[in-house]
Image (tube, helix red, strand yellow):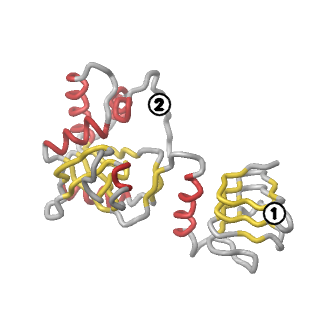
Amino acid sequence: MKLKYLYEYEPLSTAGGLFHYRDTFQKGAASDENLLFLNSDVCNLYPLGELIKTHKERDTIGTVLCATSENERSKAYGCLVLNESNGLIEHYVEKPDTFVSETISCGIYVFKTSKIFSLLKEIFNQSETSAISMERDVLPHLTNQNQLSGCISSWPFAQIKSASSAVSVSAIYLEFAKKTNLASGPNIIGEVFIHPSAKVDSDAKIGPNVTIGPNAIVKQGARIRNAIILDDTTIEGSSKGTVTRLN
């Protein structure tokens, strides 16, 4: 896979950068190609195949990966009203003050490439700044045009807004991987991943929800739970609810 990093020289909001580098994104693209747009501060197991399949079936300009949240927590996300009969999103509002719906956006989208850039150009021409918000400008516009679909995902979803939130997010991946390459043994509790190069004393008690990175050392008597131990870290005491590097 070839990766290319594009730098914003001024804040362009969540969709302005996409429009700014429109020529780069569209270079060599076929007229019927789709564009995946993923926010980097979310944790999801990314059912992209299901999302793209839904997008092609609904034949709208955009499709949003959605999840179900608790009533009060939903207000911290983009909330939407989804018509279950035709899959169209009938209403979208970003972080509402009052309850709108338990259905929220995961911040993962797929668009028809040519159509989304035409819309971004239209929004840009009507704006006084170069900044374009995906959530406040683009998605409501598509909703009003009946050109935004929703794809409900049953996979776990969480936002990563701080270093500490990475610990709870890590539990999602460990749960998903528990039948593959997780650690086991009398000193292991629950889901634990230990890198092959890490050295963990058999007397240390590890878990649940622990990831131990490359070349880490966990000494005798240590107790670790709900933690991510980074590379080249040495643990002698207990570690709980942390992302830790102690040398």
Q: Is residue 209 above or below residue 101?
A: below
Hey, which quadrant is residue 208 in on the image? bottom right
- Could you say where residue 217 lies in the image, as x and y percent from the top left? 81, 59
**Residue closest to the eye, 45 or 70:** 70
Disc 2 is placed on an element classified as: loop
Hey, which quadrant is residue 8 in on the image? top left
Question: Mark 1 or mark 2: which is in front?
Answer: 1
Question: Circle 1 sits on which residue?
Answer: 199
Mark 1 and mark 2: span between their CA atoms? 39 Å
The residue at the point 69 percent across, 60 percent down is 240
- Could you say where residue 213 lies in the image, as x and y percent from the top left? 71, 56
Q: Which mark is residue 6?
A: 2
Q: Is residue 119 above or below residue 175?
A: above
Disc 1 is placed on an element classified as: strand
- Could you say where residue 164 lies in the image, as x and y percent from the top left? 59, 51
Name the residue furthest top. 128
Task: Name the kind of residue labelled 1 in the image.
Answer: Lys
**Residue closest to the eye, 82 or 153:** 82
